[in-house]
Amino acid sequence: MEHLTVDVAIIGGGTAACAAAVALREAGLTVALLEKRLCGAGASGVNFGGVRQQGRDLAELPLSRRARLLWDGLSAKLAEDVGFEATGHIKLARSDADMALLEAYARDAAGHGLDLQLMGPNALRAEMPWLGPAVVGASLSPTDGQANPRVVGPAFARLARRLGAEIREHAPVRHAAHDGTGFAVEAEGVSVRSRTLVNAAGAYGGAVAGWFGEAAPVAPLAPNMVVTEPLPHLVTRSIGVVGGDVYVRQTRRGNVVLGGGRGTADSVDGLARPVTATSLGAGARTLALIPDLAHAHVIRSWSGLDGEMPDHIPVIGPSATTPGLVHAFGFSGHGFQLGPVVGEILAELVTQGRSASPLHPFRIERFAEWRGPYRSDGEIEH
Amino acid sequence: MAEPVVAIVGGGPAGLRAAQVLAEAGLRPLLLDEGHRAGGQIYRRPPAGAERPATELYGFEAGRARALHDLADALAPRIDHRPGTMVWGIAPREPVGFDLDCLGPAGHGRIPVDRLILATGAMDRTLPFPGWTLPGVFTLGAAQIALKAQGMAIGRRVALVGAGPLLPLVAHQYAKAGATIVAVLDVTPLGAKVAAAPRLAAMPATLAKGVWYTLRGALRGVPVRAGVRAVAVEGDRQVEALAWEDSRGRRHRVPCDAVGASFGLRSEAQAADLAGCRFVFDPLTRQWQPERSAEGRSSHAHVYLAGDGSGIGGADVAELQGARTALALLADLGRPRDAAREARLDRRLDRQAGFRAALEAAYPYPHHLVEGIADDEIVCRCEGITAGAIRRTATERDAREMNRLKALTRTGMGRCQGRVCGHAAAEILALTLTVPVEAVGRLRGQAPIKPIPLREPA
């Protein structure tokens, strides 16, 4: 059994956790990060790969705006090509009611400095003549884009390690507690003592919060993904729809990735699996948007385990029960773009006790008396 | 109570014998097979109307091939045979059983079943060597399929390279069919074959398959060599010649227009993976396979395994296992047992196990070739990933496991989903990390098992 004593222990090895390890090392603190499998192999690594501000809950927009600034320089910072391309994100309307929603959102987003361009049918077809007749209009966010989720988390983990963070993979955490002088974290093969503790445990974030007497109703979420063989370049932008039942992008390699709907999540063994009916449904909806993909072949489907909050925005902020404990989990299927900035925010919370970004909507206390419903049948987005 | 629905995936020797036993017991099993006619790979049948004499197609396997084809015909009215049907997804059903996602002549379909017999067979193992991606290079299995299904050879002047009993078998079949063979090169040492010969001789029925020397008489004047090294296909845009180094270090070169090359067999085990079966590493053949009991039970209470899909044993073993696992399934259903028949099959399987070990000793997996794979050689041909990229990713980007290697490099992320490159990539990764090959794990199976159209076929 290994024993480590550090300033900060981090539970979880997703992008936000690894980015926090980097930021904390840059601030001069000692860090131990405990990941149950491999860093970046969970929701961070198996998501759609959308780098999107458009369509987010307005409460998330300040964080998402700040995150977007980091993406341009991410490959340089990580010394690794993360595949980020600002292809724009276009959200399609399939009815007049959809279009009205896009118009309303564009007005609200403008208040946060996010410039969205509304497009009618003619402008849309002029730019993307391959869109099917089901589409009647769209809202374009030119600064959004896409990246390769498989490489971002692992690259942050390697940078953290180069900076001196102790990263322990295949080290699931059994328990954590505060003994009056500091935190004691017991994991497989290693125990850690620390002054502060970061809970970035994704789908298991609620369980960790529970050890400290805090309620956070996290449900497992398994977004369903499908990918085609590499195809000639056609889909120029990352595509979403009002309602969120399908989203599509084409990678640099030419594969078309399509998501939409849910797979099955098994939080006991920590694995999520795609569901074939969901995959076929996403395929049919994609063909309604992009009929030219009719001859494409699907080569793989997959899913991954994320944590979903009842109100579909994450928990980010200090514990309400335990000084020195900081939470960031429950990204509800759309944490990929936020990961790098959440790392910075976590480091701010640890080193300064507060963040430059407005975190009030994400406080864990909002669930102390939570009686509301889950929106679990609603939009996942990406 | 309604009869349970039993589906057999794969219509080769194992699947057909399983279907026979179930049909004899009064069940009407589903037989789902990618082939258009039952028979599997080793006894693959030509399309209807294009038949040729069995002795020409199957050589000394002709009698067994005929028997199995006759069985398929006799079973037709007693089973629900779905030819041309690919099972591409398997999902658990509540409370028990599975939904099988299939693509067949009528399009996509979902079939609920109570129990599964997986007899999914094997495919060639490949290893990269210079020129292996040139047009004109085929696997030995593909060379065989060309002969049996289409009645044609892979070229006019054919060189055959490999490690495994398929090599002399294909050489015999090609010679019998009148093809011009210019070289037969085994990359494993002759010594291993000689050492294994006494054990091989204990099985006279299959002796001819495994023994190397018989080839020499059949192919007079053609180089038939064991212990060959440094095999390289030469050619500009297609195969023009095969070069090699013999066991004494002398260089040779023979002009040819096609090369058949593979290095043993790998189990096609994706269906077992999707069904939730536990896998174990087989050190003899250096591959992960679904765990199978002597009676053919998997780790999953409702999944049964038979044939090369769960352990390479060859066609004779597959037939015995198919029958044996079907008996185990019937026993699990509470049907009356035929203890004498079970014991007979167990004894024959036991004898075959010794033969199989001898065969594997005679044709060891040539992992020593992995060291010689140059950095610029393509390993994953779907995605164009080189051996050097795999080695660099292992050392510079902490890829210590196959799924991480896939995520970081795209190895195994293309059309074949690692079916072709997975083993070679694992060997390269393990060698780079200086760990045993089992330590780097295996690529997780994901639906679809093979590519399916995004749009449902009309």
Image: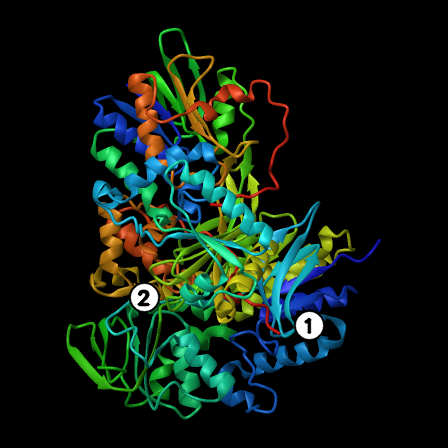
Query: Which residue reaches farthest top?
Result: A180
Residues at marks 1 and 2, common chain? yes
Label disc, if present, on residue A204 of the rendered structure: none
Query: Which residue reaches farthest left?
Result: B250
Label 2: which residue? B127
Q: Which of marks 1 and 2 is nearer the N terminus?
A: 1
Type of the residue with mark 1? His
Type of the residue with mark 2? Leu
Residue B320, quarter of the rendered image = bottom right
> Is residue B271 shown to the viewer in this render?
yes
Of residues B28 and B401, the one drawn nearer to the viewer in this rendering:
B401
Q: Is residue B458 above or below residue A125?
A: below
Residue B246, percent across and down? 20, 75
| Crowding at mark 1 (Cα within 10 Å: few <14, some 14-19, many 20+) | many
Residue B275, percent across and down? 58, 52
Residue B48, percent across and down? 61, 87
How far apart marks 1 and 2 lie (CA) works out to 36 Å
Q: Which quarter of the rendering shows the C terminus of chain B?
A: bottom right
For label 2, the SS is loop
For label 1, the SS is strand
Direction from residue A178 to residue A133 in the image, left or right: right
Label disc, if present, on residue B81 of the rendered structure: 1
Direction from residue B425 to residue B16 in the image, left or right: right
Of residues B348 and A64, the one drawn nearer to the viewer in this rendering:
A64
Across the whole image, how many numbered discs are drawn on residues?
A: 2
Instruction: Name the chain letter of the residue that bears numbered label 2.
Output: B
Q: In this view, does A371 lie above or below B42?
A: above
